[in-house]
Image (cartoon, rainbow, N blue to C red):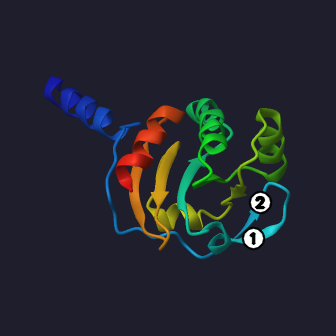
Amino acid sequence: MKRLFVYALVLLTLTSCARQSVESEARWPSVSVIDSSGAEINTDDLLTGNTLVVSLWSTWCVPCRRELPQLQEFAAKHNDVSVVAVNLGDKLDSVAAYAQEIGLTMPVVIDTEGRISSALGVTSVPSTLMINSHGKVIATHVGEITAEELAVLVETSN
C-alpha cells in the first residue's frame, strides 16, 4: 500500500503543473472562435508572421489569474512577438469582464468547444505555447509562467 502511495505521489508530481519546454508536432488550428467582444474571428488571423505566444487559461484558475497580467506585461514590452489569451470554456460575459478588470489589451479569444486546446494537445491550464510563423508549436510550458520566464522561453525557442 505504501509503495502504491509513493507511485501515485510521483505520478502526480510529474504531471501536475510541471514546467516544461518541448517541441511537438502540434499545429495552430484554423478554426472560427469568438473574441472577448463577441465578434467571430478565424484563428488564422492571429498568425501575423511573428512568433505567436498562446496562453490557455480559464477564469476559475488561480494560477491563470496571476499569470495573465504577466503576459500582458510581456506583450507590452515585446512588439516583435504576438500574444493571445485563449480562454477555455468560460462564458463570454465573464471573460470580457475579467479581461477588462485586469486591463488586457492583447487579443482574447474564447475556445468554447475546445477546438484550439484539442488541436494543440493542451489538457491543463495554465499552458503557454510558442507558435512559429508557419503555425507549428515550437515550445510548450505547462503551469504558471512569469514575464521574465516567458522572455527566456521566447529567446531560447527562436
Badge 2 element: strand
- Give coordinates of residue 46: x percent, y percent: 64, 66
Instruction: Report, in whole angstroms, how far the alpha carbon at label 1 lies from the one at label 2.
Output: 7 Å
- Give coordinates of residue 33: x percent, y percent: 71, 68
Observer-nearest residue: 124 or 3?
A: 124
Residue shown at 64% from the left, 65% from the top: 113
**Do labels 1 and 2 touch, CB within 8 Å?**
yes
Crowd tier of the residue under label 1, counting other residues whose Cα lies within 10 Å: few below 14, some 14–19, many 20 or above: some
Residue shown at 44% from the left, 35% from the top: 149
Residue shown at 60% from the left, 34% from the top: 70
Residue 18 makes an appearance in the image: yes
**Rendered position, 29 above or below 129:** below
Residue 146 makes an appearance in the image: no
Mark 1 highlights which residue? 41
Kind of residue indicated by mark 2: Asp
Mark 2 highlights which residue? 35
Observer-nearest residue: 93 or 37?
A: 37
* Quadrant, the N terminus: top left
Task: Locate residue 54: give its quadrant.
Answer: bottom right
